[in-house]
Image: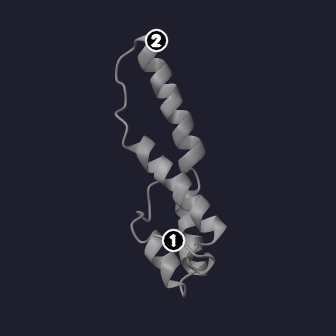
Amino acid sequence: MTLHAEDALPAEVVQFIEQRTLCDHFRDEPWPEGDSQEERERRTFLSTQLEQLCKGSDERLRLLREHYRGDQKVVEALKGFEDTIEAR
């Protein structure tokens, strides 16, 4: 399949999709419960990834959906993402 320029999504949408996909990956990672050095380091790593990748993504998704509501390619590309993943 060849992707033509007219088929491409806006760069900000592509960036959001890449970041939110990584966010969702780390959200699905098991949370280590123990107190070993390895488990503490893993919790720190996961916390850092979640903070960097997920923070603000609910609002970004809302704004992208609003801005591109008339662009069916963008609407379709964003439809699988949950509206609210951040704690309030």
What is the residue that sits farthest to the front in this orientation? 2
Q: Quadrant of residue 66?
A: bottom right
Mark in the foreground, 2 or 1:
1
Note whether residue 88 is visible.
no
Residue 64 horizontal side relative to residue 83, left or right: right
What is the residue that sits farthest to the right in this orientation? 11
Q: Nearer the viewer, residue 38 or 77?
A: 77
Q: Which residue shows up at 53% across the image and 50% down it?
A: 54
Residue 68 x/y as whole percent = 58, 80
SS at mark 1 in the image = loop
Badge count: 2
Residue that badge 1 annotates: 2
Residue 15 horizontal side relative to residue 39, left or right: right
Residue 6 x/y as whole percent = 60, 81
Q: Is residue 44 above or below residue 34?
A: below
**Label located before the other in sequence (2 or 1):** 1
Residue 50 x/y as whole percent = 52, 42
Q: Residues within 10 Å of mark 2 (few under 14, many from 20)?
A: few
Residue 6 horizontal side relative to residue 29, left or right: right
Q: Residues within 10 Å of mark 1 (few under 14, many from 20)?
A: few
**Colouring scheme, one of rainbow, by chain, secondary structure, one colour:** one colour
Q: Which residue shows up at 46% across the image and 11% down it?
A: 37
Residue 10 x/y as whole percent = 63, 72
Residue 27 horizontal side relative to residue 52, left or right: left
Q: Amino acid at mark 2?
A: Gln
Q: Quadrant of residue 32?
A: top left
Note whether residue 56 is visible.
yes
Measured Cα–Cα span from mark 2 to mark 1: 48 Å
Q: Nearer the viewer, residue 84 or 46?
A: 46
Q: Quadrant of residue 52?
A: top right
Q: Amino acid at mark 1?
A: Thr
Residue that badge 2 annotates: 37
